Image (cartoon, helix red, strand yellow):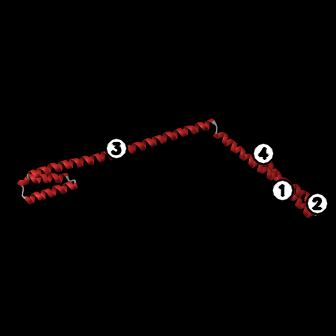
Amino acid sequence: MLTTLFYIALLAASLAMVLFFIGFVLMQAGLPWLTTLFYGIASKVLLLTMLSLAGLALLALLLTIWRELRGYFSRESFALRRILSLHNHQRNLKQQTAQQWRQLHYLNRFKRHRLLVANNRKHLRELFDAVNRELQAVKTQLPSAKYRHLKKALRRCYRQGDVDGILSVRGDMQCR
């Protein structure tokens, strides 16, 4: 329907061009009153054609908007949007669950590490205290320089967190 109206408007524009040409020929022939008549008719036909083309463009725009809105609000399109919305929601929930799991895993690993460090410090302190008590017990049996050297080595190993060093000080103490 719109294409037929468009072709009619183009035919009217062609008619206006023909009328302009006839007016030009009549002007060359020396008939000014016929030239004015044909130019007047041609300009009005051309104006009518332009207005009709503008109206057709507006009508086509409105029809396109109407079709798009009707398609957007149709049941099929609503159902498709709903399915896509649910799919996106489900994907977001999966991502959120995965993120929460990663966060909990990180926090648990962090807490385990803190507990392990605290436990290692506690055992290191207990080992230090035990070796220190043994060293105090054998203080009288050791030369003073060796005692000071072992005491200094024991403290240094404790500050460094060196369990093997503390055990080697214990071994040196028993070798006398």
Closer to the chain start, of discs 2 and 3, is 2
Residue 83 lies in quadrant: top right
Identity of the residue drawn at 10% across and 57% down: 147
Q: Nearer the viewer, mark 1 or mark 3?
A: 3
Residue at mark 1: 17
Residue at mark 2: 33
Check disc 3 and report its element: helix, strand or loop: helix
Q: Is residue 88 visible?
A: yes
User: Disc 1 and disc 3: Cα gap in Å?
Assistant: 86 Å
User: Disc 4 and disc 2: Cα gap in Å?
Assistant: 35 Å
Q: Within 10 angstroms of label 2, few (less than 14), some, or many (20 or more) residues?
A: few
Q: Nearer the viewer, mark 3 or mark 4?
A: 3
Q: Is residue 72 above or below residue 153?
A: above
Q: Amino acid at mark 4?
A: Thr
Q: Amino acid at mark 3?
A: Asn
Q: Amino acid at mark 1?
A: Met
State the residue in front, 23 or 161.
161
User: Residue 28 vs residue 109: left or right?
Assistant: right
Q: Amino acid at mark 2?
A: Trp
Residue 71 lies in quadrant: top right
Residue at mark 4: 4
Residue 134 location, x and y as percent? 11, 50
Closer to the chain start, of discs 2 and 1, is 1
